Amino acid sequence: MSRRLARAAKGAVFPEDNDSAFLLDVHRRAVPTEAMPHYRDDDEVDLVIVGAGAGGSVLAQRLARAGWRIVILESGPFWDPDRDWVSDEAGQHKIYWTAPRVIGGEDPVELGKNNSGHGVGGSMVHFAGYTPRFHPSDFETYTRDGVGADWPLSYADLKPHYEKVERELPVAGQDWPWGDPHSYPHAAHPLSGASELGREGARKAGIEMRVGPVAIPNGTFGNRPHCIYRGFCLQGCKVNAKASPLITHLPDAIAHGVEVRADSHAARVEVAGDRVTGVTYLRDGVERFQRGAAVAVCGYSIETPRLLLLSATEGWEDGLGNRHDQLGRYLMVQGASQVAARFPQPLRQWKAPPPEISSEQFYETDLARGFARGFSIQTVGPLPIAWAEHVLADGHWGRGLREYMRDYNHWTTLGLLCELLPQARNRVTLADEHDSHGLPVARFDYTQCDNDRANIAYGTKVLETVWEAAEAQDTLTIDRYAHLVGGARMGFRPEESVCDRDQRVWGLANLFVCDGSVMPTEGSANPALTIMALASRLGERLGKRLVTASAEPAGAASYTS
Amino acid sequence: MARSFREAGHLPKQSADGEPRPPEELPRQRAGLTPQMHGRYPDYDVLAQADHWDPVTRELLESRAREVPPVTVFTAAEEACLRPFLDVVLAQDAEPRIPVFEMVDKKFAQGKLDGYRYEDMPEDPETWRRVAAMLDRVARERGAPSFAALDDEARDAVVDAFSEGELESEDLNVSRAWSVVMRGALSEFYSHPWAFNEIGFGGPAYPRGYMRMHQGPQGREPWERPEAFEEDPVIDVPRRGLK
């Protein structure tokens, strides 16, 4: 479609091969499951998927359309937003992965509500909603900048899938000038007063910010209602306006024969020779085994390595795909420090979706800054508990903290997404303690490198410059992390990665990893869209038999792209 | 007290002495409740909007506002220490108080976790216990029988040292312990509708949503109330000799 036509059609284009938005009910928020099939455990389905998040759901939808019979095992519940979710910050604790995990290293990364989802829809149920693409440079940071790693595929491989997923979510935003310049299927949302100040301050500081890209339709979309600007994106969207695979891909997947088996916790992927045979899982305290001709592990950067480690067996003594001690390594998070600013007039930063405007002006390497790679700037809209954590992090308690809290409505907040580099020492291992299923829990060790610290420090200075230009009266700063990426990365050789460019685990012809853990670098972009685009690409290649789950040696499949 | 909140001199980092303005100078709450009954929005009661919330949310918020959960996890000795500690760190120096101690106890009674534990820290309930023991021990070192027996100034000094990571403990990483207990306490305090009233937060917004997102008074929904920038007349009128 030409750019002019695309602009004329903004808001009116629906995906051709995903009816999810129309399969939802107009009068209730729950995904209709009346027609969902139920497969027997001993029925060998074409694919068993572990995890109903961004990767697993998109993969299931693509392959269901190609006629595959699929079971998705999901550890958490199948949410009914009307019944299960509340419009309350504390009351939505249930949508986070809160089972025990251990964190260590010199810069431990807090998990739970910060980056780990639970239940059908996965972490995208609580993701803010930003859906930027990666830049072409992200796929070759080693070649270009001498840091990180090159991907075994390029931006061109993902571009058609970025476009496809952007239409499915759909994404709203201004024309995007950074990376590979592109437009969005929906026009940008109106800007809140609080975000106007950030955009104006940035302009005065010589920084361009644009509205979006946000995975919330501007208007209705099929049977999904208009956003009501209530600001609870990180608590799960009770409206069905903000995209998550729960509403963007699973309705269509179910209509094409996918069974989403909730409350089913995968315990082990079973192996026979150089093939996997299915997944052992726990449901209602009973151990069961679902047979499958292929398995895709889609549990994200902590649970995917954990499951592959827990699946250790004869021939794979250190875990599946871990013959070269690569599993669980190169796990990344993004530096996500935030600086809030105070203004004379009330702003009520909790109204409107937290994701509103962003800048990728500092995304690429500029050696004059003294470090490689860069960062993005984005608005955030902390609700009261998150605001209290922000005030606490700036060093306040007692009466001082209560005063800053009472001043809540006068503040607005910008955050960073700093690209932190992949390092072998940042990894998931199994801890000595066990979860409620009796399985060893994950331990995640994380330590920044000098480049990471320089990036975060520089980015924080830029935010302070923006607020100075905006003539803020006071600022408050919190250092934190966001997102998880890597842990089972794809690569060119088994000695330096866990899976190949088709996300197939080295040495196991029918075992795939399809989530954020396969990504070799993280960019300064929120990972959701790229996880979905990777799943869309893998789904297309499996569906068209460009890659097969047959017994041929891994990596020998013919490539067309 | 400033006559308007357009200036920022009431904030600790902007005031001459590094202290916030005394909250007693704020207007008394006239609609609904706030912790200690002072606030910036004296005519705003978020619970008056409950009819506009979806039923699941309404039930949760109304019960949270009503409920003082029974104490089942912490011992009487721990309670004797943690209650005054929470009063200090949350500046709850008078009734009505948000029952944060009971709310934290209830969270642990229900076995709710946050999804991570630092490798050098125990489970969260044990961290709280060790914090209580540490505070009492520090108080004894400073010549009082317990933390609860310290006067206000001495309590502030102990808490200040705790917040700076300057207390010593054999079984706790003190900086991380401060973060664990403070974030636990703040998560309960700022989930309470009385706190929403105090800070002027719109609270649950489903299914109604918001229609006004502008800066200044234009950004106020019809059911929201303005900030009260005037002083409490009960204090202000006699001080200015008007009566």
Image (spheres, rainbow, N blue to C red):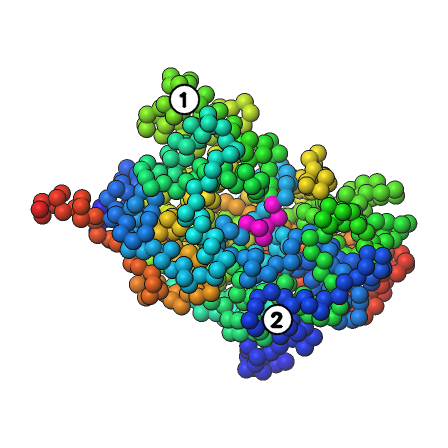
Task: Please tell me which residue lies in front, A214 or A43.
Answer: A43
The magenta-colored residue range is A93-98
| Amino acid bearing label 1 | Ser
* Residue linked to disc 2: A24
Magenta span contains residue A133 = no
Q: Residue at 77%, 43% (x, y): give it.
A: A310
Quarter of image, res B186: top left
Task: Please tell me which residue lies in front, B91 or A290.
Answer: A290
Where residue B15 appears, as percent x and y from the top left, is 28, 42
Callout 2 crowding tier (Cα within 10 Å): few <14, some 14–19, many ≥20: many
Q: Residue at 35%, 52% (x, y): give it.
A: B197
Q: Chain of mark 2?
A: A
Label ID, residue B146 = 1
Would residue A128 appear left or right of B203 to someone viewing this image?
A: right
| Amino acid bearing label 2 | Leu
C-alpha separation, residue under disc 1 versus residue under disc 2: 60 Å
Would residue A98 appear left or right of B158 to someone viewing this image?
A: right
Where residue A281 appears, as percent x and y from the top left, is 76, 49
Quarter of image, res A2: bottom right
Q: Is residue A399 visible?
A: no
For the residue labelled by badge 2, is the local secondary structure a helix, a strand or a loop? loop
Instruction: Tell me, yes or no, whether the two marked residues, 1 and 2, touch with CB atoms within 8 Å.
Output: no
Callout 1 crowding tier (Cα within 10 Å): few <14, some 14–19, many ≥20: many
Task: Please tell me which residue lies in front, A556 or A516.
Answer: A516
Quarter of image, res B100: top left
